[in-house]
Image (cartoon, rainbow, N blue to C red):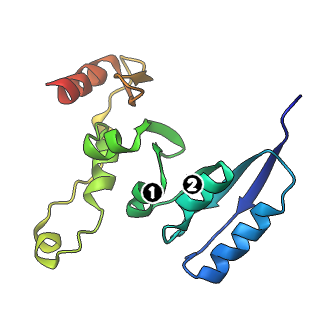
Amino acid sequence: MEKSYKVVFSILHYVTSEKTIKCIDTITENLAYDNYLIYVVDNCSPNGSGKELQEKYKLTYLFISHDLSVVEHISDTVGVMYLGNLVEYGDKADIFRNPLHPYTKALFSAIPVPDPQIEKNKKLIVYDPSVHDYSTEQPELTDLGNGHMVFGSPTEIEHYRELRFG
């Protein structure tokens, strides 16, 4: 028997109240389909309930956000995009522990640190796309192992391998 899929598109801004979570729970509960794909777009703070809903209803989220602390909390797999192009993709723990692409590193350097002294003294990385010269080597998304994919030219990929494996 062919499975049915229901796509629920939600733009949620600061989902923090128990009432809102119950509303999502009720909507999901009443959908008469076997599988769900829920798009959750930016500025979403699931307050811990996103994972519970995911497990309870076997949901898949496509979560798009600039808030990396929330991305780290809600996601299992992370894709980082720059100007609409995927530059890094992989397991959340691997991407957060070992970002390789310069844009990913710049994004992670901007994550606020709750300690004011550390935050004040931390060094931000500024991404400069001109560091890439794709005029002589064609870039591509390459798997560096365990599904950790990085976009770059063959020379850049070799550099990313060195960073990843030493």
Quarter of the figure with residue 42: bottom right
Closest to the observer, 36 or 96: 36
What secondary structure is marked by label 1? Answer: helix
Q: Is residue 87 left or right of residue 119?
A: right
Which residue, given by chain and number where applicable, does mark 2 sit on?
A: 63
The residue at 61%/51% (across/down) is 61
Amino acid type at circle 2 is Phe
What secondary structure is marked by label 2? Answer: strand
Note whether residue 79 is visible.
Answer: no
Residue 133: image location, x then y, percent: 33, 28
Q: Is residue 17 above or below residue 75?
A: below
Distance CA(mark 2)–CA(mark 1) = 8 Å
Quarter of the figure with residue 15: bottom right
Give the quarter of the figure containing the N terminus: top right
The residue at 60%/81% (across/down) is 18
Question: Pointer 2 and pointer 1: residues touching (CB < 8 Å)?
Answer: yes
The local crowd at label 1, few if under 14, some if 14 to 19, many if 20 or more residues have their Cα within 10 Å, is some
**Residue at the far front in the pictured view:** 56
Amino acid type at circle 1 is Val
Which residue, given by chain and number where applicable, does mark 1 sit on?
A: 71
Closest to the observer, 30 or 97: 30
Q: Is residue 22 above or below residue 138?
A: below
Quarter of the figure with residue 157: top left
Residue 77: image location, x then y, percent: 47, 42
